[in-house]
């Protein structure tokens, strides 16, 4: 078979040079410190350390293990403790400077040591934080050590990863400098912009600086036109920062709904966790940008960061691509969901963590709303109102633009109405699976503005219809889940361990980035578009299908069901047209009226071409033949030679006509040569327990994904899969 799989793919890499030693005249204010680290796991002896490049998630670099303490919440991957070490060489130009380290995220319980002295750290793994290294550094070699403790499990209800999983920066200024998190952009109106910040003097005193900008004919930021402006703030010739911002107006109320730049807007949103699929929690800029791009291509205009602050790269991508964001702080408050979650930190750290989120993120035009929590356990206790009030008021103090505050409320019983005092602490009330209460709630509390923060995927039509019918509902989102077969461990992940299941299979995009049929249906509802056709897996084809609360029936864009000839199979056509015709091998099967923008046909399966016609729309599915070759498709043709740029390579098994062979589970062997290194290989099967770091993996549904990282050298990256070669330039 290998002789059939011969192809080449090449990608270019842009040349960039980096050095750990800077001369006095060339010191950059902000330098990335992602290279040159040594790492050791569960042992503080650096003689055993291995070189790593940040962002780094050590959990994803292990095999799945049913006995791992993090269990199903942590994807059955180990956590534990880790130590990082980097030697930073500074010349005399750094004498007399303010030298800080900026960590975008370390999971979790981190401590930072500079030349053997504890200089800082942070317990909450999703907060960015600063470490003032000035008192501890010297010219010449400096040792930076970061300890990470993710050993106390469980501390999360989703995959957290472990380690320094976001960027680390060296920030160098004069002793008088601009406080990075004091920067504020205000737009009293669309023609006037006020950019301000606080200057910290060498003696510790502070004073404000500001710049007023007049903008004629402003180009307003929106999801359809995410236009960004830039300006600079400078202080006494000693420090200068560039500020990126957007100009837009947002208002909301129960009567008019959400209004962006004077136009009504309904939210078609998704909850997005912080991980990046097969590369784990590692927040490479390219991976974060790709994640937002996939959501944009799927038709979403809003994202909720479930259930923690995201990376800076994620928010920059939302700014640049045009995606509204609900920036969420916590999953829980004072009562635990897991033994070692945020309930242990909240009393001492809530204010600092709220500040870390708001002060870092408030200049982003994409953020339209802050969320203080998600389905908090103590929601029936009167004390919860005080907690909500404290969190919300702290946000309002730190965000003079007064973006609305929300949190996601839920009820698994009949006591929904008693949450009214808690709901009143929010500007917008988030509804998790409770939007069926919208009409009665509106009668009881007419001024309440509502937003569906989570929902069941199967309720897509009802949610869309309800949102469009009522101005006081701003929009909605869909959540977690799985389908399974009779004989598998039944139920939901929160009920019992489900090994080897290590991922949810319900979202619009799978682990390889492929959109599922439900994604096309949802986008059709909210955005319009062309007719789309999919096929429901026959019950009994792979096993008797069982669905869970958050799942939909397994459905795929395939007309290849070998062995099912002559047996009935359901075909679903999504369309905004009133009538749909279905043809099999040019023979009319039937015509149906659409209901809820879809028509369902029962067809006795025969190989060939299935075609749907709806108005002027045409779409078809063809039966695939035998596997003929592997097709490699890169998401770009050039990479930056910076050691950080990523290449996502889609691997497909196709027949001689180029059609994906959906039942193919072909063993793969991926090799990377030249100016890149293999970061991960995987497929979208949530039950496949082959490790992602291994170069050997199988396709699932005829598809897999390889992720390649630039190694920092200019040249050509060559990706070879079972004899198929793909080349990409690295410059």
Image (spheres, grey):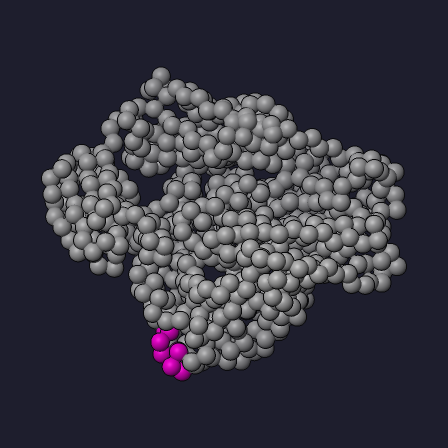
Left or right? Give the position of 290 relative to 473.
right
Residue at 33 percent across and 37 percent down: it is: 701
* The one of 25 and 147 positioned closer to us in this rendering: 25
Q: Is residue 517 visible?
A: yes
**Picture quadrant where residue 683 is located:** top left
- Give percent across and percent down for residue 262: 49, 65
Please report the residue visible at 57 percent of the width from the left and 67 percent of the height from the top: 403
Which residues fall within the magenta stretch?
437-444
Q: Residue pushed farthest bottom?
A: 444
Residue 3 in picture, x, y percent from top left: 35, 17
Image spot of residue 256 (x, y percent): 44, 72
Residue drawn at the location 83% of the way across and 50% of the way down: 237
Residue farthest to the front, as pictured: 216
Question: Which is the main secondary structure of the residues drawn in magenta?
Answer: helix
Report if residue 441 lies within the magenta region.
yes
Q: Residue at x 23, y 54 (%)?
A: 577
Q: In the rendered image, which quarter contains the N terminus?
A: top left
Q: Using residue 371 as the reference point, say whether residue 263 is left or right of it.
A: left
Indicate left or right for 449 with 216 as reference.
left
């Amino acid at each position: 078979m290998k002789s059939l799989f011969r192809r080449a793919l090449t990608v270019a890499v842009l040349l960039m040079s980096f050095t750990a030693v800077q001369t006095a005249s060339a010191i950059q204010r902000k330098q990335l410190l992602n290279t040159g680290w040594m790492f050791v796991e569960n042992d503080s002896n650096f003689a055993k350390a291995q070189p790593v490049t940040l962002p780094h998630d050590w959990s994803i670099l292990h095999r799945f293990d049913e006995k791992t303490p993090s269990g199903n919440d942590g994807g059955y991957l180990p956590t534990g403790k880790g130590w990082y070490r980097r030697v930073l060489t500074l010349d005399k130009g750094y004498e007399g400077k303010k030298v800080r380290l900026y960590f975008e995220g370390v999971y979790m319980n981190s401590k930072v040591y500079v030349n053997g002295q504890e200089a800082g750290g942070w317990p909450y793994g999703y907060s960015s934080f600063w470490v003032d290294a000035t008192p501890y550094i010297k010219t010449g070699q400096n040792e930076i050590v970061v300890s990470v403790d993710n050993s106390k499990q469980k501390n999360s209800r989703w995959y957290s990863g472990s380690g320094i999983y976001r960027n680390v920066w060296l920030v160098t200024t004069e002793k008088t400098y601009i406080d990075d998190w004091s920067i504020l952009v205000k737009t009293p109106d669309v023609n006037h912009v006020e950019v301000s910040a606080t200057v910290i003097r060498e003696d510790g005193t502070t004073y404000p600086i500001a710049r007023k900008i007049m903008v004629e004919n402003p180009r307003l930021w929106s999801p359809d036109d995410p236009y960004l402006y830039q300006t600079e703030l400078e202080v006494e010739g000693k420090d200068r920062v560039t500020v990126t911002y957007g100009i837009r107006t947002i208002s909301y109320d129960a009567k008019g709904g959400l209004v962006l730049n004077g136009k009504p807007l309904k939210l078609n949103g998704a909850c997005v966790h912080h991980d990046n699929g097969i590369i784990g929690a590692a927040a490479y800029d390219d991976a974060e940008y790709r994640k937002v791009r996939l959501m944009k291509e799927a038709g979403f205009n809003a994202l909720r960061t479930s259930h923690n602050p995201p990376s800076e790269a994620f928010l920059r991508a939302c700014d640049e691509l045009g995606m509204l964001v609900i920036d969420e702080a916590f999953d829980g408050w004072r009562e635990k969901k897991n033994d070692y979650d945020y309930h242990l930190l909240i009393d001492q750290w809530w204010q600092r963590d709220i500040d870390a989120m708001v002060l870092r993120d408030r200049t982003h035009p994409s953020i339209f709303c802050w969320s203080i929590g998600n389905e908090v356990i103590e929601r029936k206790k009167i004390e919860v109102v005080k907690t909500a009030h404290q969190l919300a008021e702290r946000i309002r103090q730190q965000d003079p633009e007064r973006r609305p505050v929300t949190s996601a409320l839920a009820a698994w019983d009949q006591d929904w109405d008693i949450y009214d005092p808690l709901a009143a602490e929010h500007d917008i009330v988030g509804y998790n699976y409770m939007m069926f209460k919208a009409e009665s709630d509106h009668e009881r509390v007419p001024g309440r503005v509502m937003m569906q923060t989570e929902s069941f995927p199967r309720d897509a039509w009802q949610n869309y219809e309800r949102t469009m019918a009522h101005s006081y509902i701003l929009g909605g989102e869909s959540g977690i889940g799985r389908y399974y077969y009779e004989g598998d461990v039944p139920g939901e992940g929160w009920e019992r361990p489900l090994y080897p299941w290590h991922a949810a299979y319900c979202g619009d995009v799978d682990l390889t980035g492929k959109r599922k049929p439900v994604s096309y249906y949802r986008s059709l509802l909210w955005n319009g578009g062309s007719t789309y056709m999919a096929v429901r897996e026959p019950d009994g084809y792979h096993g008797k299908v069982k669905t869970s609360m958050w799942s939909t029936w397994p459905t795929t864009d395939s007309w290849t069901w070998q062995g099912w000839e002559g047996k009935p199979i359901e075909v679903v056509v999504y369309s905004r047209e009133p009538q749909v015709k279905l043809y099999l091998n040019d023979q009319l099967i039937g015509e149906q009226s659409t209901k809820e923008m879809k028509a369902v046909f029962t067809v006795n399966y025969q190989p060939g071409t299935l075609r749907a016609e709806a108005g002027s729309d045409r779409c078809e599915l063809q039966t695939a033949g035998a596997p003929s070759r592997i097709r490699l498709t890169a998401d770009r043709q050039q990479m930056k030679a910076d050691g950080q740029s990523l290449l996502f390579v889609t691997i497909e098994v196709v027949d001689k006509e180029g059609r994906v062979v959906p039942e193919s589970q072909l063993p793969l062997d991926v090799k990377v040569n030249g100016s890149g290194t293999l970061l991960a290989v995987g497929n979208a099967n949530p039950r496949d327990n082959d490790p992602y770091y291994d170069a050997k993996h199988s396709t699932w549904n005829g598809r897999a994904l390889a992720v390649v990282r630039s190694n920092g050298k200019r040249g050509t990256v060559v990706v070879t899969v079972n004899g198929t070669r793909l080349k990409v330039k690295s410059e």
